[in-house]
Image: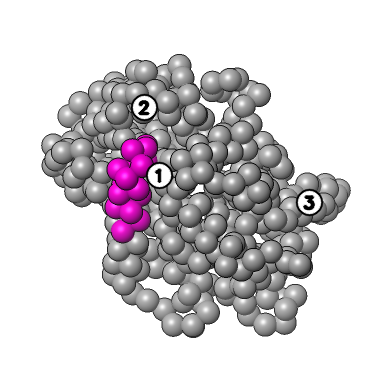
Amino acid sequence: MSDFSAGDAGASLQPLDIAWAQFDRAADVIGLSDDMRAVLKKPKRTLAVSVPTRMDDGSITVFDGFRVQHNLARGPAKGGLRFHPGVTLNEVQALAFWMTWKCAVVNIPYGGGKGGVICNPKSMSQGELERMTRRFATELAPIIGPDKDIPAPDVYTNSQTMAWFMDTYSTLQGATTMGVVTGKPISAGGSLGRNEATARGCVFTIREAAKIKGIDLNTATVSIQGYGNAGSIAHTLIAEMGAKVVAVSDSRGGIYSPDGLHAEALQNFKRETGSVVGFPNTEAMGSADVLTVPCDILIPAALEKSIDERNAPNVQARIIAEAANGPTTPRADANFRERNIMVIPDILANAGGVTVSYFEWVQNLQSFYWDEDTVNQNLERIMTTSFNEVYETSQRYEIDMRTAAYVRAIERVVESTELRGMFP
Ligand code: NAD
């Protein structure tokens, strides 16, 4: 997931470069002062930790881990923990930066955070992962907590990771502290609807965008890159709205069928075989080819930087909904602006995940749990309102949706920052 090797401007284009370029575009639109830009760009707090872990063979491996709190003006930091060999401090800082704007664009009371450990979870046993997670939680304990910083799952971490994390923090506190992380299993303080929330939120934004673009979802065609949590659930939900998913891919390759792919059958096939590749009655193609097949709606749900200036001109969709974080490079964005393709930016399109994480935290703090309909209705309200606020902003300033989302988010963070003032 954190492969930044491909893409325009080559490997030298760092995630934070992309993030700051997006921010500056919006800051220019609203004439943000240089002082405020400097305050808002830098992370508030960066913690680097060593995570010594006893391996199954008795040896000790010392992993490097990070937690970045980007901005706390609107509330405690919120953001995932990534376990991946490609984790870098630059990437974690960019992801924390994006979280600040994502929380602000959907108006939930959090700042941005992110964390990661440089490790290869695929080569580690469950026992090794548990010991590493518990030690990482111990090292982060001084700066996290339900009113300070609330981690969540990200790439190669899951609800089990969060259960270990919560248990470790609770042990250190001497008190069960459910609200220290979100994305927990239901039986350990999780929320109903959290697993589907990112895809569900994304599909609500697509529904609103389709109305504006005059696309009838009952006849629309869709292509999805990435068939994990976000991509595969988006398939199910958009098909329920009547759209036809004609192409999908995962890391092993892509498949295409102009007649449409059946969500449940394909998910069963992937569960049994490990990939979408080879699904009967489909045409095989490369993982990235699904980005450029004929379709009305494209959902990148895999890698950062998967759409760059080389493949952007060949994208045929009229709406791109970024379920993934950072899939579109700035030059690809420029191409889409020129061709009037609507990009629903990541900080809006995939904000459903953090929104239901917020609901989970609220339920934990109140020890009062909601039914799934209540979760989904509140998610729909927030995603629909946020989409329409961003669209109105894009019309008012005559700017693209990404820049409009940043404008909306920056306005909110600036307001809190100015009202709170600077200490000392
Ligand atoms: P996941 O690990 O469940 O799934 C990722 C999928 O991408 C897998 O199917 C994998 O095979 C596929 N993939 C990897 N490399 C690929 C390639 N080169 N071409 C095509 N497919 C490839 O991850 P996820 O949780 O679905 O996350 C996907 C994206 O969505 C990430 O950018 C993540 O940051 C973002 N996101 C996820 C959530 C969430 O709640 N799950 C929330 C916000 C953002």
Residue 413 percent across, percent down from the top left: 53, 58
> What's the residue at 37%, 37% (across, down)?
400
Q: Give the numbered dot on residue 102.
A: none
Q: Closer to the camera, 383 or 138?
A: 383
For disc 1, the marked residue is 404
- Residue at far right of view: 59
For label 3, the crowd category at 10 Å Cα-Cα, with few meaning under 14, some 14 to 19 and many 20 or more, is: some
> What's the residue at 55%, 46% (across, down)?
32
For disc 3, the marked residue is 48
SS category of the residue bearing label 3: strand
Q: Is residue 72 left or right of residue 108?
A: right
User: Range of the magenta residues?
Assistant: 385-401
Q: Is residue 241 above or below residue 259?
A: below
Of the residues tagged 3 and 1, which is closer to the observer?
1
Q: Tell whether position 263 is magenta.
A: no
Q: Closer to the camera, 339 or 306?
A: 339
Q: Give the numbered dot on residue 336.
A: 2
Of the residues tagged 2 and 3, which is closer to the observer?
2
